[in-house]
Amino acid sequence: MKTLILFDTQIHAWLTGESFESAEAHIRNGYPHLLEGWQAGTLKADVIDITEEDAFKSELYKVKDGIICLKTP
Amino acid sequence: MGYSAFTDNQIQGDKAVRQELWQKVKDNDEYLYYAIAAMQAGGTKMMVVLNPFLENDLNVDQIPDSWTRYLYPGGTGQYATISDSKIYCFAHPGGAGNGGGYLTSDYIEMSSFWGVLKNLGFVLWSTVAGIKNQVIVEFYSNNKVYISSNTIYDSVANPTARQSFIATIGTIPDYARYIKIKLVGGESSVDVAGTTYFTGISVNPSTEMTTEMIVSATIAEGYTANTVWIDVNSVVIPLPIFGLVNIGFEAEIRTTDVSATASQRFRIGSVYSNENSTVSVSYMSNYYKIENIYIASSSITLIQQLMRAAGSAFNVYGKKSIPKTNIKYII
């Protein structure tokens, strides 16, 4: 399942089923405090594939070296 | 001085043109000019779209009056006649880098009262669904300096028969006092040949609520310790209707420790509900609503979001409660 993630050094939004193109609409409608970072380019958006089983398990993921990756035990 | 109608006698072909006739032309022109100006700039600020059906083209240049046109490479923009109706359309010829074109309205003065500008209505369809069409609202300052824009329709899966849309304009930037409406047919980044038709552009069209339906849906208990809004659960809700709807429902929220405030909200796509918070360790019920969602499919996905206030690392929980699981659609 495609999941849109907004992040800088940490995850700021975990949006299940959303496209990359919808990032700005989400920021404007649901995360206005992130708008400044988005416009400045410090906030990034990425879409990753998550299994349906883990669709809402954002706690399994983290930001490392500028990319979203699974936390290792 | 009001509008003064011309008599047949005054415009007979063999009659000499007198100063009196030109005075009437001038007076009527000024009357109409100031009447429109009063609507646009007066205290009421009716936010009128001039030439909303794009039919008026006095100089027959194939560009609707009160609109400007841009054509992408290879693109054409012209009038077509469908069922005796004059319809404006853009044709994308296909080919990389080619496209149709877009129309941009004149400046439309908007009220400075926040929330007055809510929706934009338009009719749009294409001969090929996969062509890229957009409807964009551009915001301008009091000095008519561009601020930003909201893309309120952006699709490569367009209707192939006439369809009326009412789209939410979304967040309006501070200091925006004018808007322009941009209708993009056959945007050039998508290489699909076809024709797109536009008509019926209106600001804040009537969204009269006519029907109310109740549908049951449940979201199982979800939780998070995150300190940012995170999707935690969802439910797919069948919708027996198409069009603009408001959705209201009750849901519950609690925390595991009074030092950790629990907050909950919901979203459908990128349209968000109101938020509710609690420090109660027992479930508290609150009302949520999501307004002005345009429904174009047989179901929607309602997504629950939770957030814990920064502080103690306790989980916060939320769910749609029983028996308050009904979701009320107001259509």
Image: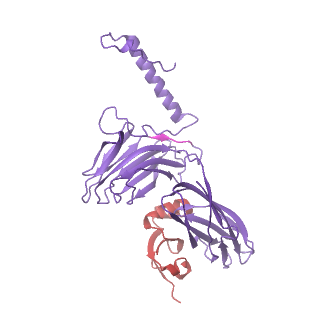
In the image, residue B173 above or below residue B53:
below
Closer to the camera in the image, B292 or B96: B292
Magenta residues, dominant SS class: loop
- The quadrant holding residue B320 is bottom right
Residue A18 is situated, as x and y percent measured from the top left of the image, at: 48, 68
Residue B297 is situated, as x and y percent measured from the top left of the image, at: 48, 61
B188 horizontally vs B331: left or right: left
Closer to the camera in the image, A40 or B90: B90
Residue A5 is situated, as x and y percent measured from the top left of the image, at: 49, 72
Q: What colour denotes chain B?
A: purple
Color encoding of the figure? by chain
Q: Residue furthest bottom?
A: A73
- The quadrant holding residue B328 is bottom right
Does B23 lie within the magenta span? no
Region rendered in magenta: B107-111
Closer to the camera in the image, B171 or B49: B49
Residue at image x 61%, y 68%? B217
Residue at image x 52%, y 62%? B270
The answer to whether one can see residue A65 in this image is yes
Tell me the red chain: A
Residue B161 is situated, as x and y percent measured from the top left of the image, at: 39, 52
Closer to the camera in the image, B160 or B290: B160
Count of labels in the image? 0
- The quadrant holding residue B237 is bottom right
In the image, residue A64 above or below residue B326:
below
The answer to whether one can see residue B291 in this image is no
